[in-house]
């Protein structure tokens, strides 16, 4: 059995952790892009978060893990197999799909099942990684080194919640609603603006500057490597609570409301910063609403600022960010730790 | 069931909406190229428009959706299968074909049906996306990032209303009369002049600068995302009326007339602006005639100017556009909203 | 049924029309290269001309459309199938083969018939577009964007009147005598000198500068688009006469003679302009002889000048053309219109 | 039978030898990158070290050489075949896999067994070089000339101790815990920073400057080439003892402890040198712990400095290394020789 | 039946004609490279020369056209089939193989006969164009545009008189003794020096500057195009005599002798001009010997100069050629015409 | 029957001839790289040398030509087929494998025997050119134009005396002990330093500057070309003696000894010239020992200098070579000629 490093045992990097929780809580935000130095626990954080999320119910035998309760989003196969609407179900972990380096378009999008094609002469669709990521997370490490074309495909699927495949004479569509998490080191090349713009949130990370914290990082890591199971045990309770808190907050999401003043604040920030198009302000608002659900209190100006800090860094044309008063109080994880 | 954001609920972007309606009304205009920033509702507008168009009658079992009433444009299969001229018919939505990123030439043009080729040794044509777009819309997002070759193929088909396939020993032709809609962000690379010239109309879009309008955009969008069905319901009546108005205008298209003075005005504008070749003035005239059908009144100078504004931006050699008095009064959508 | 815009209804562009008629009349001239802006009716002119040419007699069942009367040019199959020399015949239109964008070498040259190769184990040649163009026209739009290699293949076939295929273990040759028409927009890249030199004639076209003429262009075009059949009817008689005139002129071609003075004039022009090699003067002479057949009168100095104007523009090393007194009196089409 | 040059007979290059021993002792360090001139016995050292390591026990018939004693790391096949947990075992040499120049991704990662796929229609995984390297060494010569993509794959597998294959419709994972040794000549191109950072240790080597030592090198080499077996015999005892010492040290690894002061020293060095992320200090600590096990005494400051010298050279942004007091006393090999 | 333009009817270009005759007469010279403008009758000359050469005797059924009289050069098949040494024979034209543009390596070198490989499971060699050229001419138009690799292959075969094929698991060798003729327009790119050096002779051609001669060129060409058969008839006798003269000269080749003074002259020219290596002087001598056979008189200084003029232009490092007294008196063709 | 030009008939180029003899005598030297102008008899020399070497004894039916007397180097097949150790034997010429231009990796390394794979479903290794070169010479003309990857493969095999193949699911190794001879013209591009360093010896050649010698070259060549057999006969005795002398010297190789002073001299030269790594001095020593065996007298300082002259030119970083007193007295060939 594999043990992952616990999410809450990660030292510092609060903004990244906040962004990840919000993105998981509300897939409609459009995922997170994490930019920064190597060796800053990005991968660890993503795997850790996936680990603590509550189990989900899926329809048995469905390649996409359709939700038995959301019949209007069922895949074609589920609709066909269960016309009565009462399919057998299973519990499973929230899937975390890591795009392996060099994964091909075939494997990502799905492809013709060659075996059956050759043996039985049927053209059957073999679901790919986008299918596997449905209702879970898709993690793309070093997304800036990926072929533009594949990034585009992933962002399209993420935006529409569906995967459209038009290849080899096949024309298939299936649900692909996932939280996209990408990481990149900007020293090694940028994404083009169009692609940046389509990530919902963005955070910059760097190594800790504080000597105490660094030692804490090392201490945690060594303890974990020595005995992963024992280390995980120390954090199990807190992790479970965080998972439940996320689940509860997701339930509150539909009820979150925003007032006129906050809307105006969001629009003002975007106009002031000269953000292109309307995705910037829309994301600020949606992020603020998600924060409101997460913190279980109404949207306020502070939330708008936090949301802007997470929504805009990748949408500004190299303008410095300093002229607006932004600062995140790390309150999210602080309170999560104490939950 | 999927609900699209309603066309009339789109805030601002009147020129784009006008261009789309005219292009749909009269496929002979040669489609629209929408240039501008990301996040300006281009895709939303196209899908929304396709949604409100009235159903069309097609011949049952025809891969190209041939019109039972236009026998002289039937595909070869329809001619062969229905020599008596009275085929069974179906109603269907106007097709909106979105070119998926990375779609191959095969899938676009159609290809040999390999399954039948291998099993039965017959070489049968498998119609592609150009076939599917016949009598509908073909939407190409980020057309400037597409391989020049594929853009050329699409523009050729759009110009001729037919698709000619000469590959793998096949020589096939079929109807492919569609309204082409392309979008591009010029920051990410231009189309070459030859290709630009072959788009009928062209509009530039950018994000709204008005704070009120931006808030309206957000409000509409959030309402829609919360409950697409309810939101669509609010606009259903107006959308239906717009669809009927387009249908009626299309019926008037053959009757539209233009006087000598308007012709001269169009030619003058082109000569003044130094537009290459004759596609510029021809498109102005055809656009003016389409406007005339849409507004149900004779072509006047204002229509010529509006038409020029939509027909020339991509046909001038980087000359500024300001020296001619152009302005669109957004009258089209304004009145459409009140219809 | 498809109606093409009538050749004689084209407004202006006399030089292009002259060049096309001469090239069709005498395939030994080596075709025409039309250089110029987009939107100047180049494609229209080619299709229109092909349309009005008289029918030709071919051997039934021959993939190359061999002429029953020219036994010494028959393809190998015709020789074999009709040893007695009296094959069944058919009438057909003069073929106009348009090279589809992205046509592969296979499709152009011909290829192994895979179906028969796989099923029967025979290696049978599947004739390509060069075969289809035999005794007709091959139209290559945007020839400068074509792969150099394919241009070379086409020019070789055009020069030799035969297609030689050495591929996939096949060694096939068949007649491929056609009039090559290429178009290009020099703004988008030049052909290399070697290739330019191998086109017989060359004309530059641009949009009309005269406001009246432009309006006439629009008028004709709109009339045609409204009712192609009726419009074609208006021109049918004149078009038929032009076709017959071309046929008659072709019959006179073998009798055309040239005197010493004209020969000297042609050589002088080439020496003066520093034209490389001998293709320049040879083409002038052959063009003058073709003009003589077309106008049914002896070669005179004016014809030499006209011929030089059509034969040299692409053969000079960027030297200006002005220092020689060139001007075409458009007499060809003028008289054709009155025929 | 092939004889390798003995590890202890290598003259000089103490730092390289230390790094290799530590990396082999503790695969969790992340391998070694050896940078330097050609002709400095890099390959010889790696092969020599592999040669003297004690035999390991593996499960019979397992393609990955699973350790019978570490049931929680067994491959899927071993788990399935030996549910009772008492598999037959074999002794084997520690595998040394040298990545052949031009090895393909297929061969590295493993691939579909085509033979069985074609004959029996089964899709069976054919393990590759990463599988063969499990529990041993993977040696990549001129790693900087390797395709970035393959380096990435290797580093990923090295980091996770597992190989994940997502290709050709296969989704396979298997243990791939190995010590990675890469060599490169920086004159011929660098690795990108991300990749450098993922190698655990790094040493720079160059040819000896001392004339006596050089003569010793030649002498040893000539003796070896003349009679490899006799030469090997001279060193056999010492080599065997080194092997046993490594084995014993590996057994002490889990018991190694570090005090607060040493931790702080490591963090200080990294902050002072401005090393990105946290991989630098973590590697120093882990290397110091490995040194402690190797020397069988507690971690002290000197060990931290030695560890830093091995852990940081490739993690600093071209900053000179001199401002920290580093020097390795070559004590490791000195004592090894006397063991 | 196809008629070629007669060799002797070519106006001017004496140096090219001399070089071609010498190259054909003595394949050991290493062929000719003709450099110069397009449209200077290069192809015509090569085809014309091939046409007038006497028939050769070949072994019936031999793919390489082995000479029944030269048993020590027979291909392996001939040796095997005719152990008794008395094979059935045929007369055939001297083959002229024109390398078609885009000919593949397969077709050039020969390849596995796929048909037989698939049907009978035998791997049989399918001879290529080098095989077809054996004992004849290989004509490569625009050799500078050919892939370096193919040029190398051709030059290797030309140098060794054999073709060595090591591909697809085949290891085949067969005779490939031919006269190589390449043409190129240096404006379109050079050959690299190594390749230039391996052509035996080299001539530069340009269009005629004399007005009379140009008119003669046109006159001949027009006469030929009007009635190829009649035109060929006019020259038939002279052509036949030239062919016989070449045949007779070839017979004298083995007897040609050179004196010390001439040898010295050749070496002096090369040393003076700084020609690399020894191929320059060797070629001068061999060319002079061939001239001697052709003119049926001993080598004299004038022949050395003529030979140098043909052997060195492509072997000097851009040094001007003027400082040596070179001039060819065109005596060869002059006398040939009078033969 | 093919006759090669005799080795001893080559005029001048003593250093090249010495290097070739030493490399053949002692394959452990690592081959020779011959740099210089084209047309300097490089290929001729290699073929000539291979020709005069004594026959070798091989195991009958072995694809690698295993030496019956060196059982510890037998290939796997020989070990398996002849467990008793007394295989049937054959005499054969020392193989000279010339790498054909464009030889593929498959053909070089060996590959899967497709025929047997397809027909019998077995995956059998088809030995390639490295196998054929075992115990002989591998000649690579224009090695600098070869793909780096293939050069690497060849150098690896040359260094290890074995070929390791890891492709298409095969994992094969076989003996590949050969003398590598490469040639290159540095004007056409260099080898990268890593590759240069791995050639044992290196000589620079150029055309002879002496007029007498050049005439001698021509004379020999013409005599040879006129009657290869007769010419070869003139040199047969001397060639045979040279072959025997090489064979005898090879037998003395194991006994060659070197004293301290000579060792020191070699190391001094390398330190003085700043040669990277240890391959330089090692090669000097091994070359001196080979010279000692060849000349049958002890190593002296002069031999060290000669050896350095052959071992270092390609190992210095563009430093001039003049500051060391180097000169070869051509004594090797001189005495060989008198043998």
Image (spheres, coloured by chain):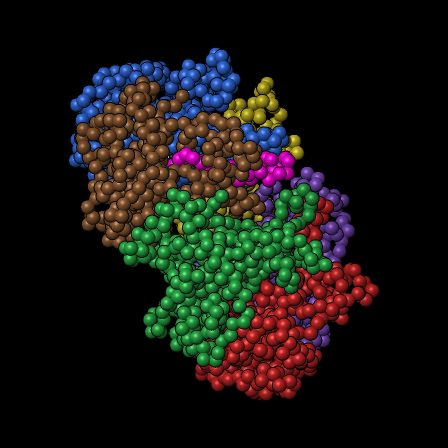
Chain colours: A purple, B yellow, C blue, D red, E brown, F green
Q: Nearer the viewer, residue D285 or E265?
A: E265
Q: Position of residue B258 (x, y in %)?
A: 35, 29
Q: Nearer the viewer, residue B154 or F160?
A: F160
Quadrant occupied by the N terminus of chain D: bottom right
Residue B262 lies, with reference to residue F58, above or below; the image says above
Q: Can the viewer see residue B104?
A: no
Q: Position of residue F144 (x, y in %)?
A: 43, 57
The quadrant holding residue C254 is top left
The quadrant holding residue D68 is bottom right
Q: Nearer the viewer, residue F122 or E274?
A: E274
Q: Nearer the viewer, residue F288 or F150?
A: F288
Counting labels gives 0
Residue drawn at (58%, 43%) of the image: A167
| Residue F177 within the segment the image draws in magenta | no
Give the magenta-colored segment's residue range.
E111-140
Quadrant occupied by the C terminus of chain D: bottom right
| Residue E124 within the segment the image draws in magenta | yes
Q: Can the viewer see residue F9?
A: yes
Residue D202 lies, with reference to residue E305, above or below; the image says below
Q: Position of residue D169 (x, y in %)?
A: 65, 51
Q: Position of residue D122 (x, y in %)?
A: 71, 48
Question: Could you tell whether D130 is left or right of F199 in the image?
Answer: right
Question: Could you tell whether A157 is left or right of C48 in the image?
Answer: right
Question: Could you tell whether F206 is left or right of A105 in the image?
Answer: left
Residue C303 lies, with reference to residue A112, above or below; the image says above
Residue drawn at (64%, 80%) of the image: D238
The quadrant holding residue A49 is bottom right
Residue drawn at (56%, 30%) of the image: C123
Q: Residue furthest right?
A: D84
Residue drawn at (41%, 69%) of the image: F306
């Amino acid at each position: 059995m594999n043990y992952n490093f616990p999410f809450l045992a990660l030292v510092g990097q609060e903004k990244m952790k906040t962004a990840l929780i919000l993105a998981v809580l509300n897939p409609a935000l459009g995922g997170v892009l994490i930019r920064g130095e190597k060796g800053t626990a990005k991968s660890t954080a993503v795997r850790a978060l996936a680990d603590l999320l509550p189990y989900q119910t899926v329809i048995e035998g469905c390649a996409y893990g359709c939700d038995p309760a959301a019949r209007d989003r069922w895949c074609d196969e589920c609709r066909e197999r269960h016309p009565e609407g009462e399919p057998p179900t299973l519990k499973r972990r929230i899937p975390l799909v890591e795009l392996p380096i060099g994964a091909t378009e075939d494997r990502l999008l799905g492809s013709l099942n060659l075996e059956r094609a050759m043996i039985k002469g049927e053209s059957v669709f073999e679901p790919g990684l986008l299918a596997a990521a449905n209702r879970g997370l898709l993690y793309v490490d070093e997304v800036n080194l990926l072929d533009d074309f594949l990034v585009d495909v992933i962002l399209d699927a993420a935006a529409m919640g569906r995967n459209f495949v038009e290849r080899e004479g096949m024309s298939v569509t299936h649900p692909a609603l996932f939280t996209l998490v990408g990481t990149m080191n900007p020293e090694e090349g940028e994404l083009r603006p169009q692609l940046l713009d389509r990530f919902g949130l963005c955070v910059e990370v760097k190594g800790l500057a504080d000597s105490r914290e660094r030692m804490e990082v090392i201490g945690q890591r060594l303890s974990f490597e020595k005995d992963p199971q024992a280390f995980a045990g120390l954090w199990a309770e807190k992790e479970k609570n965080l998972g439940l808190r996320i689940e509860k907050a997701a339930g509150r999401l539909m009820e979150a409301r925003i007032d006129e003043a906050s809307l105006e604040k969001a629009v003002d920030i975007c106009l002031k910063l000269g953000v292109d198009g309307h995705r910037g302000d829309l994301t600020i608002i949606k992020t603020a609403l998600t924060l409101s659900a997460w913190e279980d209190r109404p949207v306020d100006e502070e939330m708008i600022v936090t949301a802007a800090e997470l929504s805009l860094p990748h949408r500004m044309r190299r303008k410095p960010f300093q002229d607006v008063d932004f600062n995140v109080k790390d309150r999210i994880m602080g309170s999560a730790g104490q939950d």
